[in-house]
Every structure is written in structure tokens, then in C-alpha cells.
Image (tube, helix red, strand yellow):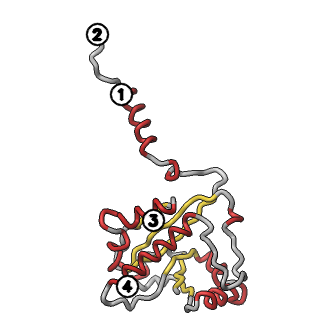
């Protein structure tokens, strides 16, 4: 019997998997095992989210390519005036991420992982977008931190947050989610807002 020239479904599936593997860069593949997941959630005002994403995703895609971190814009929450931007990556050794907050104030530190580098670039994009808007009265940065980690931001007797305030020359505060405030709907019930 003469072959019909059509490929079997098994061959098509195999070819599709090969093609998908070739398209997918190695840095975007999820890792597991002993790698530690580092996640940041920064809030972006609704009015500038389009500028932060960029036309056709140009700004966000550029940040992804420059840092090799994952950057995702979370769908809007009803009533919230800010959008959550999720920034994350995997790191091999967690001890590399831990930095000494008591180091010299003039010490220019490099980001310790791809997610931290991407977070700084996303923050810069938000600041740039806010500077362009006519009513740039929104001058605070907001990140979401699980309540279980808020103590690490504050420190014993407030030592860490006092040091952060001194180094950044800004007022930083940690406040819990207010369930009665509809603008807080972007946060999980166990989240705190870190504002600076």
C-alpha cells in the first residue's frame, strides 16, 4: 500500500513539541528542585499602566529581556485604583539574597537577583509614566508584603525600617489591608502595604 503523504498524529505532536522547545528560550523555562522562588508584587496606578506596559508590550518585554525575570501584569480587581505587577525569578542559593541592612549608607549595591533588578526597572517605568501625567501628585511607591514577612521589614524595635528611612530619605510605613476599603481589593487578606 502506498503512503498517503499525510503525517500521523504522533509525528505532528512530536514536531510541535520540538518547535515549541526551539521557540522557548532557556531562561524562561521554569526551574524547580533546590532553586528558591523570589517574588515581588509592586502596585502601579491604573492611570499609567498602559505606559508601563508600553505599546504592544514593548516596555515590559524589554524589562523581561534585560533581566531574565518574569514580569506579569495581574488582571484588575474591582474597585482597586492600582494594578499588581508580579515580578519573580528562581535563584540557586538563598544566602546570596540576604544582604546586611547595616552596611554603609553610601554603599551602591547591585541587585542580588533578576527579580530585584526587574523590580527596580518596573519602578523606574512607573515613575517615568507618572512624571508625564499632568497630575503627578502620586509620589509614593507601594509593594505588597505578606503579613508573615512584615516583621522583617520593620525589624526589632523598628530598627530595619528606621535604617531604610534614613538611607532612602523617605517616609516608609507598613500598614495592613483594610477590608472595608475597596481600593485595597488588589491585596490578599494576609497582605500588608509597604509605602514609601
SS at circle 2: loop
Disc on the earlier residue, 2 or 4: 2
Residue topped by disc 1: 9
Badge 3, how many Cα within 10 Å: few under 14, some, many 20+? many
In front: mark 2 or mark 4? 4
Q: Are marks 3 and 1 in contact (CB under 8 Å)?
A: no
SS at circle 4: helix
Residue at 70%, 88% in the rendered image:
159
Residue topped by disc 3: 63
In front: mark 3 or mark 2? 3
Residue topped by disc 2: 2
Pick the residue in front: 9 or 77.
9
Q: Are marks 4 and 1 in contact (CB under 8 Å)?
A: no
Residue 131 disc label: 4
Badge 2, how many Cα within 10 Å: few under 14, some, many 20+? few
Disc on the earlier residue, 2 or 1: 2
Could you tell me how far apart the alpha carbons at marks 3 and 4 are, in whole angstroms?
19 Å
Residue at 61%, 71% in the rendered image:
110
Disc on the earlier residue, 3 or 4: 3
Residue 89: image quadrant is: bottom right
Residue 183 in the image: state x and y as whole percent: 40, 82
Residue 74 in the image: state x and y as whole percent: 41, 67
Amino acid at each position: 500500500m502506498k503512503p498517503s503523504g499525510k503525517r500521523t498524529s504522533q509525528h505532528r505532536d512530536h514536531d510541535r513539541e520540538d518547535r515549541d522547545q526551539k521557540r522557548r528560550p532557556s531562561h524562561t523555562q521554569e526551574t524547580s528542585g533546590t532553586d528558591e522562588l523570589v517574588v515581588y508584587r509592586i502596585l502601579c496606578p491604573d492611570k499609567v499602566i498602559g505606559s508601563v506596559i508600553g505599546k504592544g508590550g514593548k516596555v515590559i518585554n524589554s524589562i523581561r529581556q534585560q533581566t531574565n525575570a518574569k514580569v506579569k501584569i495581574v488582571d484588575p480587581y474591582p474597585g482597586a485604583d492600582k494594578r499588581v505587577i508580579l515580578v519573580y525569578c528562581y535563584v540557586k542559593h538563598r544566602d546570596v539574597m540576604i544582604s546586611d541592612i547595616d552596611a554603609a549608607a553610601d554603599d551602591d549595591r547591585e541587585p542580588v537577583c533578576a527579580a530585584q533588578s526587574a523590580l527596580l526597572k518596573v519602578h523606574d517605568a512607573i515613575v517615568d509614566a507618572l512624571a508625564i501625567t499632568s497630575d503627578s501628585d502620586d509620589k509614593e511607591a507601594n509593594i505588597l508584603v505578606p503579613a508573615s514577612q512584615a516583621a522583617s521589614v520593620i525589624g526589632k524595635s523598628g530598627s530595619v525600617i528606621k535604617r531604610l528611612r534614613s538611607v532612602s530619605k523617605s517616609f516608609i510605613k507598613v500598614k495592613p489591608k483594610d477590608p472595608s476599603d475597596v481600593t485595597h481589593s488588589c491585596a490578599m487578606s494576609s497582605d500588608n502595604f509597604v509605602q514609601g
